[in-house]
Image (cartoon, coloured by chain):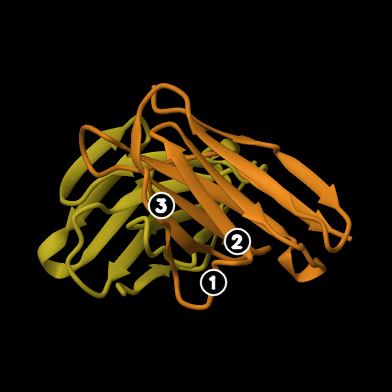
Chain colours: A yellow, B orange
Amino acid sequence: GIQVEQSPPDLILQEGANSTLRCNFSDSVNNLQWFHQNPWGQLINLFYIPSGTKQNGRLSATTVATERYSLLYISSSQTTDSGVYFCGTGLSFGAGTTVTVRA
Amino acid sequence: GAVVSQHPSWVICKSGTSVKIECRSLDFQATTMFWYRQFPKQSLMLMATSNEGSKATYEQGVEKDKFLINHASLTLSTLTVTSAHPEDSSFYICSARPLRGRNEQFFGPGTRLTVL
């Protein structure tokens, strides 16, 4: 199956900082998604982004399908952005990036 | 829209008992539902994919007689952990892919199973 690698594994941010999370995948995908898992375990859909760029508030994502990677941008981070961010295809997920935003 | 529920949200049971977890798509019909388990500090591991009216497809290493999956309707899939043992304790998550529209999945809130 497709291998998904995420980086960095951990990220500590000061409130207000910007950051970029990366997702590399080993083969072509047509259903890449980014999720945020909150402290209670709920996975929240952030983006369905097999290609192109999307923005939703302070978050945006870009997938370059031909180069097999996707980026998630967090701007002006807030403490509520803390949690684990996963990218994946539904069949395969990365190991996640744990984001901690400090006030 | 696109809400998926799971029931129960947590369950504690004795070793040897069976536990049923329900996954429902509340406002859409789901052609395909997926079951995952997640251990602490780890990623989601796909256990099986189920399509309405047909047998589930299990991932390698997942015992189909241990984890029974039934997808009886376009809005309901169930996972039954049979003869549960402490090593089955985990966080179980389902997701559903809508019948119509793009190839996006929506996740339930998860069920935390603790087997004593």
Going 41% across and 21% down the picture, which residue do you hit? B27
Could you say which quadrant of the image residue B10 lies in? top right
Disc 1 designates what residue? Answer: B62
> Of the numbered discs in the image, which one, if any, rests on residue A93?
none
Disc 1 sits on a residue from what chain? B
Q: Position of residue B93 (x, y in %)?
A: 56, 49
Disc 2 designates what residue? Answer: B67
Instruction: Check the image and report above or below for A74 versus A93.
Output: above
Instruction: Please report whichever mark, 2 or 3, sits nearer to the chain's N-terminal start.
Output: 3
Question: Type of residue at label 3?
Answer: Ser
Label 1–label 2 contact, CB within 8 A: yes
Q: Position of residue B67 (x, y in %)?
A: 60, 61
Going 65% across and 41% down the picture, which residue do you hit? A103
Q: Do circles 1 and 3 both sit on a common chain?
A: yes
Q: Secondary structure at mark 1?
A: loop
| Residue B104 appearing in the image | yes
